[in-house]
Amino acid sequence: MNLLKQKAPCAWEIAAQGRMLVPAIIYASEDLVRAMDHKVYEQAVNVAMLPGIVGASYVMPDAHWGYGFPIGGVAAFDADAGGVVSAGGVGFDISCGVRCLHTGLRREHILAVQHKLADALFEQIPAGVGSTGSIRLNVAQMEAMLSGGAKWAVGRGWGSSADLERIEERGQMLHAKPGNVSEQAKKRQREEMGTLGSGNHYLEVQEVTAVFDDTIAAAYGLHLGDVVLMIHCGSRGLGHQIGTEFLRRMVEAAPSHGLVLPDRELACAPIRSDLGQEYLGAMRAAINCALANRQILTHLVREVFAGLLPSARLPLLYDVSHNTCKLETHKVDGKLRELYVHRKGATRAWGPGHPELPEALRASGQPVLIGGSMGTGSYVLAGTTASESLAFSSACHGAGRAMSRHQALKTWNGRTVIDELAQRGILVRSPSPRGVAEEAPDAYKDVRAVVDAADAAGLARKVARLEPLICIKG
């Protein structure tokens, strides 16, 4: 704590020193900061050394050690000032994100068919390491998917145009370059569309158990006792392959660009370089892959509900990613600047009035979807106007790990975790008890503390808490 200067109750500064070009700011309560490992401090400092960084190196309340950037790290770079793009600042699971669907149902409707619904969702949604689905993409279809994203999926019958209005980028990330994606990456994805994957990815049926802002909740269509559904997944094997390949290329090319990396894991390339542009084109294709994947999963979910709960209606509340780098316009020192904003384990959080938000949500601000652990619940927040100046309109993305997966495996038995959650009325379905042990609720930070810190810091405003009834885990 002696290395930090407290600027506000939930804001701590690491002053620029040595090779740091800007300060680093950690947004968290004192308890959360004390619980962070020192690697978060080191990584935040290292990010602040990268060329062309603007403002500060920011850290969200759920931060923990990651590859290169801390998970929960945010940094913006100006291409005109020699700014860089870093594959380690985006992460391996490119465009991993969360979408939330209404159901029009209440708790009693779910409890009447809870076991049947859990089994049907588990049967319909392929989950787990290396999981594949029934969709097989040929070369032309792969190219179209990587260019079109969720818009492509809707065009093939997996959803409706109304869904696109509630998806970040309207469901299609422009300027994607499928040609920059390797054949190996495409091969890994050919049979993985419409699959959940493994790790912390999940599909949850949830009940709204608390409302903190009645006005915004009503604008979002959320009411106490409502049942919603969250899908958390990303670009699967394709995104991981892109991250792996470009990290290696960026490390090898760094000397030719005159880059002296503070950490090999912070491999990067000048935005204006050929390599930087190649990565951005491939990364945008991976964003489209993730958006298409969540759209197909939404279609599969709707089919399950139509069979068991035909009165259900599943319109989309919102879909937002938390592993991206995007070109955005932000006000810095009173002037508008185009910046490449890296958010790794951090969620975009536009405030009220932002022109990129759909009209129905513009007055309230962007829904910020915060995934919790299987036993603690998730949250819906709203972006704030203040967040623009605090961290380029960014907020946390989840609870954040409190211990490694290896430690969790040594601490918990997956079957025991499933049984204990069932006793609390939460049905878990997973192909891997080992995966459940790795994702045990207590392996994560207290999501309530993380969300309270984000709210107190002004990054996003608490709207509603959601507690799980059914969880499908990879």
Image: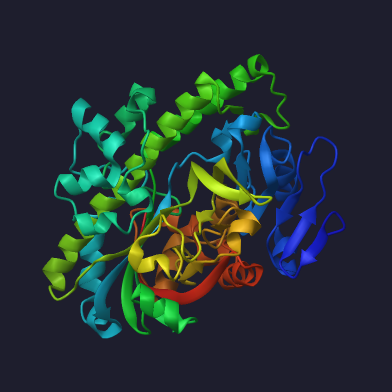
Asked whether 389 or 287 is in front, the reply is 389
**Whether residue 424 is visible:** no
- In the depicted structure, whether residue 174 falls above or below residue 366: above
**Residue 115 left/right relative to 215:** left
- In the depicted structure, whether residue 270 falls above or below residue 378: above
- In the depicted structure, whether residue 343 falls above or below residue 110: above
Asked whether 241 or 472 is in front, the reply is 241
Residue 221 point in image, percent of width and height: 33, 76
Q: Residue furthest right?
A: 2
Asked whether 84 or 385 is in front, the reply is 385
Name the residue located 71 percent from the left edge and 46 percent from the top edge: 44
Residue 150 point in image, percent of width and height: 27, 47
Residue 368 point in image, percent of width and height: 47, 63
Q: Residue furthest top?
A: 256
Asked whether 186 or 368 is in front, the reply is 368
Name the residue located 54 percent from the left edge and 53 percent from the top edge: 346
Quadrant, the N terminus: bottom right
**Residue 307 left/right relative to 179:** left
Q: What is the image's colouring?
A: rainbow
- In the depicted structure, whether residue 332 falls above or below residue 230: above
**Residue 470 left/right relative to 437:** left
Name the residue located 32 percent from the left edge and 29 percent from the top edge: 186
Residue 161 point in image, percent of width and height: 20, 54
